[in-house]
Image (spheres, rainbow, N blue to C red):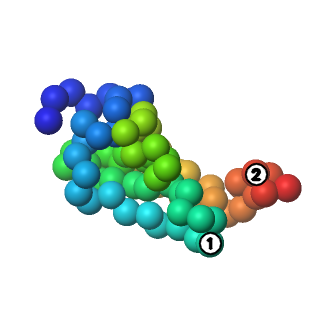
Amino acid sequence: MGRIYNGMPAKHLGTEGWHKPWSGGNGGSCVEALKLDDGRVALRQSTDPDGPALIYTPHEIRKFIQGVQAGEADFLLA
């Protein structure tokens, strides 16, 4: 695999290993996550698996999850 960068086509990260941790009863439209070998995490939209992947460091993902757990993202649901 070549250089991994934010916004790269998700298909260049392969098709194996993607998970839908936030899947629900939304007709299959959800976020998929892939843990990369170097510890970073790639996110993509399940309805556009060839579209761009957002790449996050372990620290960024940890802070995001901690913030969600603390209710800091609740404004997105209001």
Q: Nearer the viewer, residue 62 or 30?
A: 30
Residue found farthest to the right: 78
Cα distance between the residues tagged 1 and 2: 18 Å
Horizontally, residue 13 falls left or right of residue 47, namely left
- Please provide percent x and percent y for residue 8: 35, 29
Quadrant of the rendered image containing residue 1: top left
Determine which of the numbered discs, if any, sits on residue 25 in the image: 1
- Please provide percent x and percent y for residue 48: 46, 44
Identified at 25% across, 42% down, the residue is: 13
Look at the numbered discs 1 and 2 and tell me whether their residues touch, using CB distance below 8 Å.
no
Residue 9 lies, with reference to residue 71, above or below; the image says: above
- Please provide percent x and percent y for residue 22: 53, 65
Amino acid type of the residue tagged 2 in the rendering: Leu
Quadrant of the rendered image containing residue 7: top left
Horizontally, residue 70 falls left or right of residue 21, namely right
Q: Nearer the viewer, mark 1 or mark 2?
A: 1
Q: Nearer the viewer, residue 31 or 61?
A: 31
Tell me if residue 77 can be seen: yes
Residue 23 lies, with reference to residue 60, above or below; the image says: below
Identified at 37% across, 39% down, the residue is: 50
Amino acid type of the residue tagged 1 in the rendering: Gly
Q: Quadrant of the C terminus?
A: bottom right
Horizontally, residue 45 falls left or right of residue 6, namely right
- Please provide percent x and percent y for residue 17: 26, 59
Horizontally, residue 10 falls left or right of residue 64, namely left
Q: Earlier in the sequence, mark 1 or mark 2?
A: 1
Identified at 62% across, 56% down, the residue is: 67
In the picture of the structure, the residue carrying the numbered disc 2 is 76
Q: Secondary structure at mark 2?
A: helix
